[in-house]
Image (tube, rainbow, N blue to C red):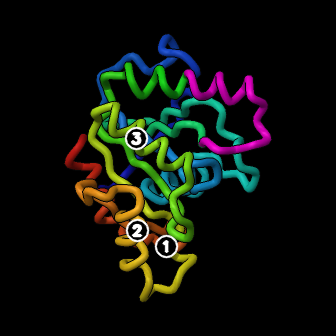
Amino acid sequence: MIVKNPQFEISAVSPKQYPKNDLPEIVLVGKSNVGKSSFVNTMINRKKLARTSSEPGKTRQINFYNIDEKFYFVDLPGYGYSKMSKVQQEQVGSFIEEYLFNRDKISLIIFLIDIRHSPTANDKLMYNYIISSGKPFMIIANKADKIAPTKVLDTTLNLQKEINPLMDATMLPFSSEKKIYLDDVWEVVERHI
């Protein structure tokens, strides 16, 4: 897909702030610092639409990016960041839950995990959460440029066995750095918008 005019639209923490149109929403979930903002920027071929940070836990709101009035990329706050206070974690957790379970515009959830590490307890919790939401999803093994190219497919398969033992979800490697598998991911996204 060629993206011409992507726009950051709004940061929200409650349903009354969500966009009011009927565009489908492609939602990004994953732990802090897994590369959700870089993923958005790579997909739309922009350097800085989604703000990236070297400090994990910066995103504490739901960010809606309007992609050419066709759909939204929706970046949810990352989980598992310990410097957030318990109260902040609970607030963020409750508005993520509110969004994921009650928003009827969600067309696809993209669950990003780090290809270099086994899924954490929080990753497994999020996976179960996604399953219980009943919404379509895919898994991205991100940061594929950080391991040897010859190991990418085997590592992705092994990760899938760990997090998705039924092997019934689409799972693809991805690299914002090298733009690996970009077309494959777009193909899945386009099927859901």
Tell me if residue 142 comes above or below residue 83 in the rendering: below
Q: Answer yes or no: do the residues labelled 1 and 2 have beta carbons within 8 Å?
A: yes
Query: Label 3 crowding class (10 Å Cα cut-off): few <14, some 14-19, many 20+?
Result: few
Name which of mark 2 and mark 3 comes first in the sequence: 3
Q: Given the image, on which type of amino acid does mark 3 rest?
A: Asn
Q: Which residue is mark 1?
A: 144
Q: Amino acid at mark 2?
A: Pro
Q: Which segment is the magenta one?
A: 79-94
Q: CA distance from mark 2 to mark 3?
A: 21 Å
Question: Which residue is found at the position 50% from the left and 68% from the top?
Answer: 115
Q: Secondary structure at mark 1?
A: helix
Observer-nearest of 148 and 23? 148
| Identity of the residue drawn at 58% across and 48% down | 31
Q: Is-magenta flag for residue 56?
A: no
Which residue does the numbered mark 2 point to in the structure image? 173
Establish if 12 lies above or below 118: above
The residue pinned by badge 3 equals: 128
**For the residue labelled by badge 2, is the local secondary structure a helix, a strand or a loop?**
strand
Kindly tell me whether residue 107 is visible in this rendering: yes
Q: Which of marks 2 and 1 precedes in the sequence?
A: 1
- Position of 27 compared to 186: left or right? right
**What amino acid is at disc 1?**
Ala
Q: Is residue 74 left or right of residue 130?
A: right
Quadrant of the frame with the C terminus: top left
Circle 3: element type: helix
Question: Which of the two labelled residues, at mark 3 and mark 1, occupies the earlier sequence position?
Answer: 3
